[in-house]
Structures are given as structure tokens and as C-alpha cells.
Image (cartoon, rainbow, N blue to C red):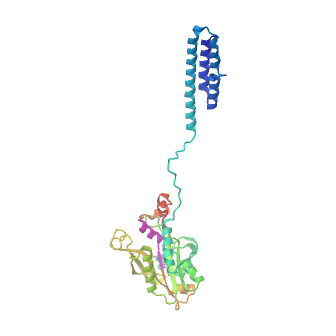
Amino acid sequence: MNLEHELAVLETEGRAAIAGATTEAELEAARIRLLARKEGRLSAIMRGLGQLPPEQRPAAGAASNRVKDILTELLDARAAELAAAQDSKTPRLDLTLPGRATWRGAKHPVTLVIDEICDVLAHLGFTRARGPEAETDWYNFIALNTPLDHPAADMHDTFYLAPGILLRSHTSPVQIRTMQEHQPPIRIVAPGMVYRRDPFDASHAPAFDQLEGLAVDEGVTFVDLKATLAEFARGLFGSSARVRFRPSYFPFTEPSAEVDVSCMLCGGSGCSACKGTGWIEIMGAGMVHPAVFEHVGYDSERYTGFAFGMGPGRIAMLRYGIHDIRILYDSDVRFLEQFAGVS
Ligand code: 2NL
């Protein structure tokens, strides 16, 4: 076999071996077989150059070098290809990207308001109390001086679970149960879910949080109620907050009042939230009706007390500028995460 032919075979087989190498190890093995100084096939051919007649040697040397250059270039190119393929298979980490922040959770805005109200009332001696959400009609209506033929007790206003068993429509049963278990003096605050057969729209929900307070002792008067709620308003809305009482009616209090607070958004000068009046209604209140005391076995000649009730959800909506109550129930983290870090 002459040298020219041997070089042609080497080039052809070398090209195939290089193109067919699928790993860097295979490519390195091909490089050694083709070009290694000692055992490589090109070296073996070039060692034979010495046997050629001197006039043929330069041309044969040049031909050998040309094959060596071609194969070297192909080896380098294939090495680069394999390295690139390897890179694209390995997931790349960009260590300069900012880390993904972890979601640390947040208290729901209504929970924030409930906790804050309970904090303010705790300074006035009120202890948190709770009770069942499924109640009897006695605890929810009768004990509260509300006869079962009252519209509030109607099938269309209350969720009945069974005859005489219902989802509480206010947290007052908690106070009834507390009075049955404890003698005066008592001062409690009862937050919790209540249920009414209302439509679910921008301003109503069939389930919502309520919060009621109750204080009972000898000699408790309407002055105590006014002072407590004035102090409550200052604690919740700031030292310049004022309260005003308007006559009202509840079956379980006498006298009864609607309580307004000077608008927490405009300070009382008038804005869209208070409809220009400077006042916002935030709760109902009154002196506990003697019939309620008789139902729990308290001596209504000896004890007097006041009670109040409010919707913390409404206060949260005012405070945080929420105009559709349904947002409070959506569990949408884009809404909830805005309260992270608020305490
Ligand atoms: C309102 C009005 C009120 C009460 C709740 C109460 C509880 C007992 C006895 C007497 Cl055990 N009263 N609670 C009193 C007046 C008003 O709530 O507008 N709530 C959202």
C-alpha cells in the first residue's frame, strides 16, 4: 500500500471515528488511535517516510501534515460540540438571580382587627370567651328576650340544623353560657363566626365575624357603658376619636343605642366613607335587659350590666379601604400577603 493511499484511508476512517464519537472519552480514544505520538496511526505512517527516496520525502511529509491538520481541526470541533451538548443538558444555575422570597403568611385583616379590639378591651379588664357555633334556639333567642315568633328567629333569617338547633346568629349565646357558669362581676369579650340567611353580595355574607362585650356587676350604669366605649374608640382609632349614642332598640337591652365614632378616615370633617356626616356607625349597645338576667339565674334587682356588639369585618373594610366584603372570603394571597408583617 503506498503512502498516499494509506493517508487517504486514515483520513476517511479518522473523519468517521471523530464524527461518531458521542462522549468526550470516545473522542479522546479516537485522538489517541489517530494522532498519538507513539501508538498513533499517523505516527506509524510518518515513521515510514524515512524509507522513501529523498526526492519524494518533502511531498509525502506535506501530505502527512495536511491529514494531521485536518484531523486535529475535526477533533477540536467535535470536542466543542460535545461540550456544548453537555452544557445544554445540565440545568444552569444563575447565581446572580435574586432568591425567591418565602411566603411567611399573614394574619387575615379581620383577625388583625379582632385581636386589636380584644387588646384594647383587655386593658379595660375584659377576658376573651368563646362558645359553640351550633346552638339551641333557647341560647340564641329565648334567653336573649327574643321570642321565637320574632322575625330574627324566622326560618328565612336563620340556618336551622334540626328542630330547635341552629347556627348562632350572634355571639350572645357565649355570654349567656358564661353567665350561667360564673357569678358577677364578669367582663368578657366574645368574638366569633355568626350565621344569617343573607345573600352573598358586595355588602352581605351568610357567615361573618361578630364581636360582643358584656360587663355585669352591682352598680353598673349607662355612664360606665359610655366611658368604656369612649375609651375603646380612643384605643382603637386614636386619642382624638369621639363617640356619640343614638337611641335604638334591641330585645336584649334597655335602653339601647346605636354607637357612632367620629370618622376614622377624615377625622370628622366629612368624606365619602362617612357620607359627609363625620360619623360612622360601628356598633350597637345598651343596658342588659332584666329578663336576660332572670333567664341565667342572676338577681336582676341586684345586678346591672351593659353589652355591646359590632362587626369587626366592617371595621376592617373601613380601615383598609375594602369595598367588597367577598374579598375577605376569597383567600387570594395577592390580597392577604399585603397584611404580612402587620400586627
Ligand atoms: C349589633 C348589636 C348588640 C348586644 C349586642 C347583648 C348580649 C347579652 C345581653 C345583652 Cl348576653 N346584649 N349583646 C347588646 C346590644 C347590641 O349588638 O349591632 N351588633 C353587630
Instruction: Evaluate whether residue 101 shows in this view.
Output: yes
Tell me residue 284's x, y (percent): 44, 78
Location of residue 280 (image quadrant): bottom left
| Vertical relation: 308 (above or below) 329 | below
Residue at 42% across, 68% down: 319
Tell me residue 89's x, y (percent): 57, 38
Residue 251 placement, left or right of 267: right
What stretch of residues is rendered in magenta?
A: 308-320
Specify the farthest residue to the right. 39
Residue 254 placement, left or right of 278: right
Number of labelled discs?
0
Residue at 65% across, 18% down: 44
> Between 134 and 165, which is closer to the camera in this rendering?
134
Location of residue 243 (image quadrant): bottom left
> Between 34 and 153, which is closer to the camera in this rendering?
34
Q: Does the stretch in magenta take in 318? A: yes
Location of residue 163 (image quadrant): bottom right
Specify the farthest residue to the bottom. 301
Tell me residue 328's x, y (percent): 48, 64
Residue 4 placement, left or right of 273: right
Q: Does the stretch in magenta take in 52? A: no
> Between 329 and 67, which is closer to the camera in this rendering?
67
Q: Which secondary structure type mostly characterizes the magenta part of the structure?
A: helix
Instruction: Evaluate whether residue 207 shows in this view.
Output: no
The quarter of the image holding the N terminus is top right
Tell me residue 162's x, y (percent): 59, 71
Residue 12 placement, left or right of 277: right
Residue at 61% across, 31% down: 24
